[in-house]
Amino acid sequence: MKKLTLNCNVCSQSFNYPLTQPEHRHQDLEIGGVPINFWQAVYQLSVADLIVDNGVEGILRFRHMLPLEGAEIVSQGEGNTPLRKLDILSTGADILLKDESLNPTGSFKDRGMPFLIAEAKLLNKKKAAIPSTGNAGISFVTYANLANIEPVVFLPQDTPQAKIDMMKNNATLVFDRDLIQSYEHFFSFCRQAPDTYNGFPATNTAYIQGLKTAAYEIYMQLNCHSPDWVIIPCGSGGNIVSYFQGFQDLQRMGLIDKQPRFVPVQIEGADPITYGFEHQIRDRVPVLSNPVFSRAEAIASDTCFNYFKIQDILRATNGLAISVTDEQIDQDRSFDGLEFSSRSIFPALAKIQNLIKQGETVVLIGTAKNRKEIIV
Ligand SMILES: [Zn+2]
């Protein structure tokens, strides 16, 4: 795309993207110094840009639908992941798995990181940082290394060792007590180190725009149709925001007439999205006081920095938020190739199966691969 403008939903100011000025903040809307996502990306769309055949497969096929058009993108063939038919529900609905575990570093994060790193390059940063529970860190370190940018990753101390092993030789790793501590530490670090690129993925425009390519692929894989449902594991929620953005682009271009119903999945007791949805909390971001411990670290949290956007998505698409337990994930054997957090989609599907009608299409987002095989 030729131009992207960022509107701040809080103060209605507009900014040219990428932002080159010091951080735009609304401190009364921060949680422990961590901003919620108040950015709205505004851009023109053209069907010709979507369907152009540039001889490239994967995310770069959609280059003209994405920002930073002139920038060099470090790519390893991300995207173009299969939509597998699963025979796991006997309701007469089509159940399909978008298998994002087949991306180069094993997760959907690879669709966004090339653009996040391209933005850091464009801003002449030699060093870049993000917080992560593991998968984002693995992807970020990989692309930063390829682009000769020095990566710093803030991680909770209970990050699985298999994931740490994939980063430790190629990045500076900083460990904190839990993810929220990592977030707070990360923001305080970035504010004291303006030469370091702040790549906070939950709200990063380049990253979220890159992720939305999965929605375009699903539309094309369904012969130019939108699914009826999208069930998607959610932590900080950048993924659901980006899928919505992708389908919204298709709707704005007149290619689909409705959005799928979105179903974000979290862990019961560490589920601010479900908690806020069920209690109809619209004026504040819930912060749960004692979130349960879960092995699904990517989708268990006390708060959510895309909270307002996700509640808007649920209202706009007649969606619903679902929580599952570690035990329910353990009991499911639908697709072992996905990591534990990702497999939350299967018990979530079971919980809403009575709402799914015959002939409907349900897309489950398999976010990341099971990395057990690399533990020696
Ligand atoms: Zn503002």
Image (cartoon, helix red, strand yellow):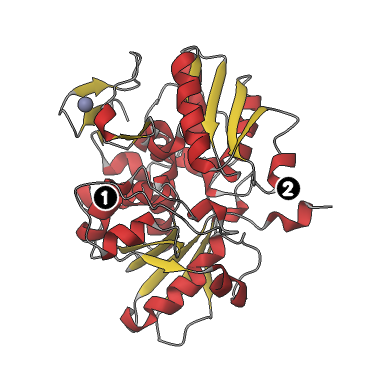
Are the residues flagged by discs 2 and 1 in contact, CB closer than 8 Å?
Answer: no
Ligand 1 sits in quadrant:
top left
Disc 2 crowd, CA 10 A, few/some/many (<14, 14-19, 20+): some
Question: Which residue is identified by label 1?
Answer: 248
Which amino acid is tagged 2? Ala
Which residue is most to the front?
289
Above-or-below relation of 184 to 165 = above
Between 278 and 107, the one lying in front of the other is 278
Between 188 and 209, the one lying in front of the other is 188
Above-or-below relation of 6 to 373 = above
**Mark positioned earlier in the residue sequence (2 or 1):** 2
- As helix, strand or loop, the secondary structure at mark 1 comes to helix
* Badge nearest the viewer, 2 or 1: 2
Which residue is most to the right?
376
* Residue 156 locus on image (x, y percent): 59, 41
Left or right? Give the position of 332 relative to 93. Answer: right
State the mark number for residue 110.
none
Asked if disc 1 is less than 8 Å from ligand 1, the answer is: no
Tally the numbered discs: 2
Which amino acid is tagged 1? Gln
* Quarter of the image with the N terminus in it: top left
* Residue 41 locus on image (x, y percent): 27, 34
Above-or-below relation of 166 to 99 = above
Disc 1 crowd, CA 10 A, few/some/many (<14, 14-19, 20+): many
Q: Is residue 127 visible?
A: yes
Residue ID at (75%, 40%): 165
State the mark number for residue 162.
2
